[in-house]
Structures are given as C-alpha cells and as structure tokens.
Image: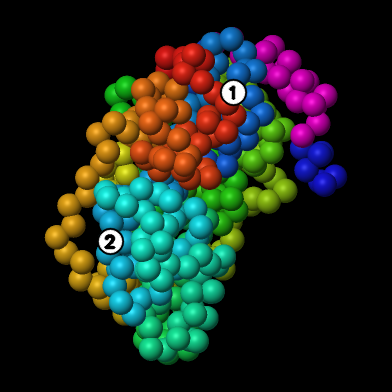
Amino acid sequence: MKYLDEYRDPALARRLLEELGRTATRPWRIMEVCGGQTHTLVRQGIDELLPAGMRMIHGPGCPVCVTPLETLDRAMAVAARPGVIFTSFGDMLRVPGSETDLLSLRARGADVRVVYAPMDAVRLAAANPDREVVFLAVGFETTAPANATAVLHAARLGLTNFSMLVSHVLVPPAMTALLEDPDCEVHAFLAAGHVCAVMGWREYEPIAARYGVPIVVTGFEPLDLLEGVLMAVRQLEAGRFEVENQYVRAVRRSGNTDAQEAVRKVFQVTDRSWRGIGALPDSGLELADAYAGFDAARRFDVGGLRPVEDPECIAGAILTGARLPTDCPAYGTRCTPRHPLGAPMVSSEGTCAAFHAAGRTASARSTP
C-alpha cells in the first residue's frame, strides 16, 4: 500500500499542522461537503489537531443521508410488490424509512438484492424478462454517469422491465443554500474530489466570487485534507476567494466531459427535497422525458405515502453542521449503528457513524 502511505506520512502531517498554526490568525470555520472526507477527518483525529479556535464543520456530504424519506418509503413500497426484483447498493439497505428498512423487508420475503454497479441491475433485467427489475439510483454527481450509462444500455437492449428510482442530488445548490442561511458560519469549503473528477470545478467559481468564500477541491487521504485546509486558510488570511485544486492527481477544471455528456443526455435538473434539510430548487436530477419509460416513480403508483421522521433524530441539524452527533441525546444510546434512528448513524459516510466508529462520546461535546 505504498501509494496510500505516501499520503499518510506522520512527519509531513506534523509539518502541515505546524504551518497551519503559523498561518491562521483567526478562528476560521471550514466545511467539508463529503462523507468520505468527514470519516478521514474524524478517524484520524485531524479535526481535533487544528489550531485553537479553528473548526471543521461537517456538511451534507453523505448522499445516503440526504436521500429524502419519501424516496425510501417509495422504494420499500415498490420492493414489496410481487414480481419485483429491487436492487440497490448495500449502504441503502439499513437506512430507516418511516416504518422499516429494505433489509427488514428482504427478511420478510421481498426480493431485495445488493448490486455493485447499476449495470448489474441491467443484466438482471435481461436475464429475468418476466420480472420487473428496479434500481435505487441515489448519490451526488459522482454516481450519475454510471446510472446514465446503465439507462442508455438498457435502451439499446430494448429492455422494458428495467427502471430506476432516481434521487440524485447536486452539490453547488446545497452550498449556495448553506451560504444564504443568515446563521451560516462557513468561511471556506473543501469540495469533494470525486464529484469534481466528474464535473470539474467551473460551477464553483461563481459561488466563490459571489459569497466571498474560498473553495478548495480536495482528496480523501489525511495529507490531502490537511493541505486542503492549509490552502483554504492561506486564501482567507490573504483576503482571496477563489477555487483552487489540491487534488491535482485526479481532477481537472473541465472534469470528465464524456461523463457529463451522458448525464446531460439521460437526466434533467429538478427541484429536490433533502432529508433533514428540506426542498432546494434545482438541486437534483431526474430522468429526462426521453427516458421516462425507465422512471420507476412513474411506472409504479405508490401514492398515499405519508413520510414520518423520528421526532428524536436531529439529522437535519447534523447534516447542515449546526450540531455535532454528540449533541444528540440519543447518540450512542437509543441511536447506534445497529439500531439507527436516522441515516447519518447507519451510512458508511454519515457523520454520526464516523463519530461512533471513532469512539467519540457525549462527554466530548463541543458547541458549534
């Protein structure tokens, strides 16, 4: 694992932290909008090693966590139908809906299967022409190209028994909504490297200029994150508000234009409700009219859903960075990875799951 070791060198980490301490003169607040980055920051204790007063704010970077409750309830209503093979990535199976989750539904006899790529669901549809095969398509811009490719392939095969329940969300509108909140404390952003590998960073440039916030495209290893924080602080201290790229080994300003073209062909921008946050205009993707035949939401009528959030869960405040997991009275007691009240505790990218895995306790609470 030499490649990873190069980005986890403790000596280099100490040098970056020392440089950060020399550079920062104010208690800056920096938000990462990526669950993978959150887990690295918390697992490695980076958020606790920053200069006094500086704080990382953990944003809505977990795509599983922000998938609206209505989508989950719809997914379970579809999965429970006879003749349906319901497919999903494994991290969605234990996310609680209003009454149950997909894993429990499978235990009661529903044909719910874990797949490793949306193309696996297409192959299932081709192999089972007498069954309806549905794929739960969630995620940020990162997973949209693979989902678009699966729809294009299903169309070429002429499959009529394949569909997707789509709940894609987009990062820039979420950043804008956070910045327009009068209580926003974010001074700079770390942008998710894998999202920018697909989309590039041109769409972040107007946000940095309009709101006066540095945005640094950052990778996922400890040294990536420390360097990204340092780059953001250097901008803040100099009064610059630009988009910079720390993740030069993987990201270009233009992104992956072939992937973007596939997404534009299959999907169209739509308003989207974010779990725990609410409706954000133009913050999601849905299947374009030309591919409406592959839209499970149109194919399966499951009206009458009344999503009900657990009243004890403060996922919304955690997803926006207003609270830490350890501020929740249920954290680690009534809400655990085995028995989650909300998605941030069960998702592999959730902030609550990161804190719990790192052994953070309520006694270590800090007020944002």
Residue 265, image quadrant = bottom left
Residue lying farthest to the front in this orientation: 108
Please determine whether, in this image, residue 229 is positioned above or below residue 138: above
Tell me if 307 is positioned left or right of 52 in this view. left
- x and y percent of residue 283 in the render? 34, 50
Please determine whether, in this image, residue 131 is positioned above or below residue 308: below
Name the element at disc 1.
helix
Residue 85, image quadrant = bottom left
At 62% from the left and 35% from the top, the residue drawn is 40
Look at mark 1 in the image and give the residue it sits on: 47
- x and y percent of residue 72 in the render? 32, 55
Q: Amino acid at mark 2?
A: Arg
At 40% from the left and 33% from the top, the residue drawn is 335
Please determine whether, in this image, residue 349 is positioned above or below residue 152: above
Q: Earlier in the sequence, mark 2 or mark 1?
A: 1
Residues marked 2 and 1 touching at CB (< 8 Å): no
Look at mark 2 in the image and give the residue it sits on: 74
Nearest the camera: 246 or 105?
105
- x and y percent of residue 152 in the render? 47, 78
Q: Is residue 149 visible?
A: no
Local packing at callout 2 (Cα closer than 10 Å; few below 14, some 14-19, many 20+) is: many
Query: What is the CA distance from the residue labelled 2 to the residue labelled 1?
Result: 37 Å
Q: Is residue 17 visible?
A: yes
Nearest the camera: 174 or 129?
129
Tell me if 267 is positioned left or right of 357 in this view. left
At 44% from the left and 54% from the top, the residue drawn is 92
- x and y percent of residue 137 in the render? 42, 63
Magenta-drawn stretch contains 283:
no
Q: How is the image coloured?
A: rainbow
User: Start and end of the magenta stretch?
Assistant: 8-26
Tell me if 322 is positioned left or right of 244 in this view. left
